Image (cartoon, rainbow, N blue to C red):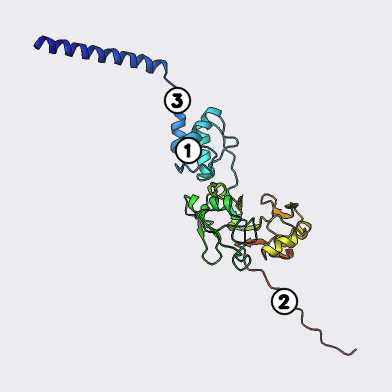
Amino acid sequence: MGISLVYTIITVSSIGVTAAIILYFAARKFYVYEDPRIDEIEEALPAANCGGCGYAGCRAFADAIVKDNSIEGKNCPVGGNDTMSKAASIMGLEAVNQTPRIAVIRCNGACEHRPNTRNYEGASTCAIEAMHFGGSTDCQYGCLGLADCVASCDFNALHMDSETGLPVVSDENCVGCGACVKACPKDLIELRKQMPKYRKIFVACRNEDKGAAAKKACAVACIGCGKCEKECKYDAIVIKNNLAFIDSDKCKLCRKCVSVCPTNAIIEENFPPRKIKAEEPEKAGIEA
C-alpha cells in the first residue's frame, strides 16, 4: 500500500514537471513582445473607450500609435490636445494641436413646424423605426425623436426636449466623440468646428426635396434657394441636392446668411442679441 502511494506521487510529480517544461518552452517559442510604450500611452489616455478615436478602445489606440510610430491623423477627442501631447512625448514626437469638434443637430422640425400626420407603433428606437417606418411626419429626413443619440452618449451631453421632441446638445459636456453621429439613422448629427464661446451657425435641415415639397413638409425646411450662398463672402456655403450646407472650417460667424434665409432654416446659437437699428426720425417739413 505504501509503495503504491510512493509510485503514484512520483508519477504525478513527473507528469507535472514534464508539463511545466513543455509550457515553459511553448511560452518562450510563442512569446509576443509588447512595446512598454503601449502601457504608458494607455495610462495617459482618459480610459473612456468611446471609440471617438476610430479604434476599438484606448488600448487599441495606444497600440496603433506605437506600431505606426506616428500620431499623424490620430486624435483622442475626449482627452484633446493635452492628451495627444503626452502621447507624442512618450513617442519622442511633437503633437500638432487640433481644433475640437462639437455636435450639432441638423433638424429644427419641432412639432409646431412639422406636425405628426401618422402614428408609429413599434419598438421605441430610431434605428428600428427608420428601417420599417418613414416617420410620423411628412418629412422623411427629420428626427424621429426616439433618443438613440441620447442613449449612445457616455458623457451626458444629450437630452430630449419634451416640448420640441428634438435632442439638445450640452456644449459643455460634448467631447466630440461621434457616438451620437453613428447612432442617428437619419444622419442628422454633425461634428463641427468648436468656435469661441460655443457659437454656432449651421443649416438645421437635411431635407433634399425640392423647395415646395420641403416647405410643405416642414415650415423651417431649407428650400435650396441659394440666397445664403450668394450672401456669403467666404465661400463657406454650398448648395447641393436642394440643400444648403455651411462649412464650419470656413465660416467666419458673420451671421449674414441667417438674415437672408427665408425659412429660418439657418440656426445661430450662443450669440449676443442682435442690435436693433434705431429708426430714422421722420423728417419734419421745413419751409424754405
Mark found first going from the N terminus, 3 or 1: 3
Looking at the image, is mark 2 or mark 1 nearer the viewer? 1
First along the sequence among labels 2 and 1: 1
Residue in view at x 56 percent, y 29 percent: 68
What is the x, y in percent for residue 80? 53, 44
CA distance separating discs 3 and 2 = 70 Å
Left or right of 32 in this view: 108: right
State the CA–CA distance, disc 2 to disc 1. 56 Å
Q: Which residue, given by chain and number where applicable, does mark 2 sit on?
A: 278
Q: Name the kind of residue labelled 1 in the image.
A: Cys
Q: Of marks 3 and 2, which one's residue comes earlier in the chain? A: 3
Q: Is residue 273 above or below residue 69?
A: below
* Residue shown at the point (31%, 13%) measured from the top left: 21
Residue 173 appears anywhere in the view: no
Per the rendering, the mark at residue 34 is 3
Judging by the rendered image, the residue that carries numbered circle 1 is 58
Query: Please, what secondary structure does the residue beneath circle 2 have?
Result: loop
* Left or right: where 206 falls relative to 157: right
How many C-alpha atoms fall within 10 Å of the one at disc 3: few (<14), some, or many (≥20)? few
Badge 3 vs badge 1, beta-carbon distance below 8 Å:
no
